[in-house]
Structures are given as structure tokens and as C-alpha cells.
Amino acid sequence: MARTKKNKKDNNIPNNDLLMNLPYLLLTKIIRELDEDIDRICFSLVCKRWFDHRDKYLWFNCFDLKQESKDHFDNKKNRYFKLNSFKDQFQRSLESDKDCTLLIHQSEDKDRKNTNYLILSYGKQIIDDSIKLVDFEQYEIKSSYKKIILASDVNTLINKNMIDKIGKSNVQSLFVMGMCGFEVQLPSNIKDIESRNYIEEKYYPNELERLVYHDRCEVNTKQLPSTLKVLKIEEDDFISLPPNLEDLTLDFDYRRAQFTKPNESVFPSTIKRLQISTKWLDNIKHMTSIETLIVSALSSPILPGSIPSSVTHLTLKYGRELGIVRIKLPIIAEIFPENIKYLKLEGDISFESDLFSTMNHLETLDLTTLVTTGFGEINVGELPSSLINLYMPSTFNGAIRKSVVFPKNLQHLDLGIGFRGKVVAMPKSIKSLALGTHSEITPTSIPQLVETIYFRSICRLTFLKEWPTVTTSITIETDTFSYYLPYMIPDTLTTIKVKLSDITYSIRRLTSTSLLVFGVSQRNLTIYLTGKKARLLQSSIPQSVETFFFKTDSLLKLPEDSSQPLQPL
């Protein structure tokens, strides 16, 4: 769901006549269901009236924009912003009560102030503002700030006055990046703590709901708040856990785990998601609350009856990723619960052909990180008719007909990034298809019902006339723009996404001759649109140096000199 759903206010719509403003209230509700800002722009362009009255209903997510930056929509400071017709809506949305993040640091690094994001354990974290510790007492924490990140150089300098100030704010989440040297009771408004080092239990907020440790810490589980719903710690013997836990992750060190045995520890009956090693299977096999289970296997196969019958989403991890000697772990059909819907296998796991054929409720099978033979071969065999999504191993490069029998109702197929063979034997039911880096495709390779195709690195569109009319969307994952973009765009394509490591550029066809290009990036991107019939309507690409080529009607030969970008309308 869009982040702005809870943030948008309707006070810009007059309240004196609800009936008169009902259309705008409905439009606002629809807009909130669209996650991508480019979709919201396209929605407002459906008709002239919606465009003229856009200020009454249109809000943007502004996911990747820093709230404190004043330069995003200033044409003098950001020459790549061209969506002037939507400047007011963008500015209003950016200043609204979105969930913002503040970074507190001690460093004298001049570049720290310009930090746009941090790479944390769970992914990229946008930094809306940063402040030096010495200036924090005079800093006003705006109501939109919900998260504070304490850099590793400030943790030992935190004092009670600073904590009291945080306690009077709307901050709910705290991320501690370094050693935790402060000895201050954390305020009750903090519901979420992530840390790389141990924080004494006596300093936890009384109403803490989420606690995540990213390194080994000796946590006294007896003293954890009863309000905890999410807990991630390194596994160790424990006597009790908070009674209301719903999500528990017990990370394990395989070197220690091989020499320890579990005690009679009892898991709360409220747990819905659980990540453990095989060490704990005997403790949970009779539980009925667990729906999602992630098991890191050690030295012995999983026995029938070990996995609770209530589990519908199951992930089994074994081998290379865990640092264990490369020995295949065999699995059999009898270990799986009857109502399993989602199954993911990772690492050195082996199975017989047709293993999954009797799983009549299985909807998703993910083999992306499964280790195959040295030649990329695997024998999956027959699959159940209930299967909707299939992800082949990333190293898969065997003959399709010898490796797998696709079910007749399959809708999404990912052949794996390493697949270089011919794309054949595709079921007609497929709606989205992810190709390998060098997959060989022909006009007849793509089923006529495919709506979306995912290209990796190299996107070869060389059969424009035979392109399926139903295929309206493509996604390209690449590290560079210089060579791997499509040389031609079929007329039926309405949506194109280009994914880099840190950004996604979205392109929407508005008319047969107009394309809308939208993206926000740390690096620079210059937009060129070549071809007599093609015109770039508007673009929002802050800060750029690379080149983006498009042509809509024929094969494109890259010009030697493309230094002059086409002016947007």
C-alpha cells in the first residue's frame, strides 16, 4: 500500500458541500491506491478536467526524495526537473506528514550533510535530514520524523536531555549503528529498536513492539517487555519468551550450534512467523499458530512430522550460504505439510524428480538460490496444476523439456539469470516471463497471453511485427545504459521499467508519439528520444550524465554525437 495513504489530508477540499466535492474525495481515494508516482501523473492526464483540478485530489509518494532538500523542484538548481505542471503537488506532498528519517552523527565529514541514503541490513534507508550531535539540542524534530538513526560515533555521547527530547517527538523507531554506551531509559514512544550491539534490558521502553539485533548479543529473554511482537536475536537456550510474540527470528552460528542441544524451551502460542535451525524442530512440531516457517538445516535430514501442519509458507536453507561442507541434503515429499502454498529451497538440497507433483495446494515454488550441477542442470519433473509462480535456479541452464513439465495454469515463470538456452515449451497460460541474461527468444517463444517480460542486462527486441499484442510491459535489469537498452519499442508497449542497483526509471506511453519518463537517482541521466514520430513529453530525472536512447518505429543506430538532448514539450 502507498506510504501516503495515512498522510494525505482532505482539508484542501471545502467541507461546506460534501456532495459537490464527492468526486474529488473518490479521486483522492483512488490515487492513494497507486503506489508509483508516475501512475498518479498518468491518472491525472486521463481527461482535461482531472488535470485542471489536480490540486484537489493529487498527492505524490516522493519515496526517494529528502524532505529537507529545497532543490528538487527548483529549475535553477535542478535542471532535470521538467514536471512544472505538477510542481505544487510535489512540493505539497514532500512537505506533508510522510515518515521521515533523521541521522544524528558526530563526524566533521563535509559530505555527511549531503548523504541521501544509508545501506542498512534490510536495504536502503532514505535520510531526509542529518544533524551533528552538538547541534541536536537546538534542532527541532518535526512531526513528520518517525525514525532516528544514531551513527556509530555518537552512541557513547547520548545523554538524558537528548533522550527526553526524543520522548517529546513523534519518533517511533531507533536504529543504533555502533556500540551502545548510553545508560538512559528510552522513552515510551519508541516502539521499534534495531541495534548492532547489546542494549541493557532495563533501558528498553515499556511498550516496545519490535527488537532486532544484527550481531550476537547475550539477551536475557526473561526481561524482555511483554509487548514485544517482533524479535530477532542469535539463537541461544532460553527459558521463556515474551507471551505476545508474532514474529521470531533465531539466527544461529553453525560452529556453536553443532555443539549445543535445545532445552525444553517453550515458544509462545501466538507466533505466526518463525525462523530457526533444525535444532528447534522438536520444540515446535505440535504448534498450530505458525504459518510461515524458515528452517536452516544442519547435519541431518528433516524427518516427517517435524514441520507443523499449520505451516503454509516454508523456506528450507542448507549448505553453501551457511558455510557448511558441500554435502547435499535430501528431502522427501512426506516432510511437507498438506496445505503448503509457498515453498522456497536454498543451497545444497537434493530431491527426486516429480517431488512437488502431489502438493495440490502449492502456488509458488522458488528455487532461485538452489545449487544446481556444474552444468546448471536440474530435474524438477512434473509440477502440480495449482502452481501459479515458478522461479527456476539462477544457475539453471539445462534443456527446458528435459528439466521441467510446466503446469497448465502457470502464470509467472522466471527462467533464472544464468539461462542461455532456447525459450521453448512455454505454457499458454503465462502472463509474465523473466528471461536469462542471454536467453534465445523468437516470435513464437512468447505465449500470446504474456503481458510482461523481464529482461536481464541484454534486451533484444528484434521482431517488432511479430511482437504479441497482449504484451504491454517490459522490465530491464541492468548495470549500465550504454548498450543494453532496447533498440526499438513495439507500438503495443505501454510500460517500460529500467532497474539499476539503486533506482528504477519508469516509462509510460501516453500516445503513439509521446512517452513519459520518470525517475529519481543519485547519479545523473540525460534523456534523449530519437525518431521523427517520437517526442519526449516530460521528464523528471534529477542529476545526470549517462544517455538513454529510444526509437519507436525502426532499428536504432546510435549516433556518434548525441550531445544535444531533445527539449521536452
Image: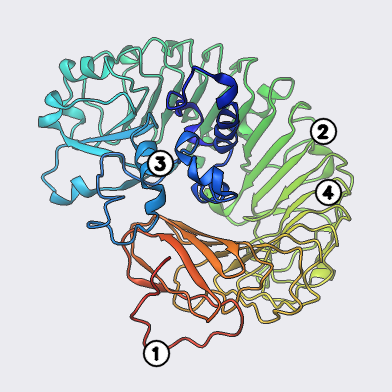
**Mark 1 secondary-structure assignment:** loop
Image coordinates of residue 250 in percent, x first then y, are 52, 30
Front: mark 4 or 1:
1
Gap in angstroms between the C-alphas marked 2 and 1: 59 Å
Mark 3 lies on residue: 89
Q: Specify which label sits upstream in the sequence, 1 or 3.
A: 3
Mark 4 lies on residue: 356
Image coordinates of residue 423 in percent, x first then y, are 76, 73
Front: mark 3 or 4:
3
Q: Specify which label sits upstream in the sequence, 2 or 4.
A: 2
Q: Image point 70% across, 20% down: which residue? A: 289
Q: Image point 26% across, 52% down: which residue? A: 74
Mark 2 lies on residue: 339
Image coordinates of residue 255 in percent, x first then y, are 48, 41
Amino acid beneath label 3 = Gln
State the scheme by which the image is colored: rainbow
Mark 1 lies on residue: 560
Residue 183 visible in the current orientation: no
Residue 541 visible in the current orientation: yes
Please, is residue 274 above or below residue 470 in the view? Answer: above
Please, is residue 406 above or below residue 59 in the view? Answer: below
Please, is residue 24 above or below residue 514 in the view? Answer: above
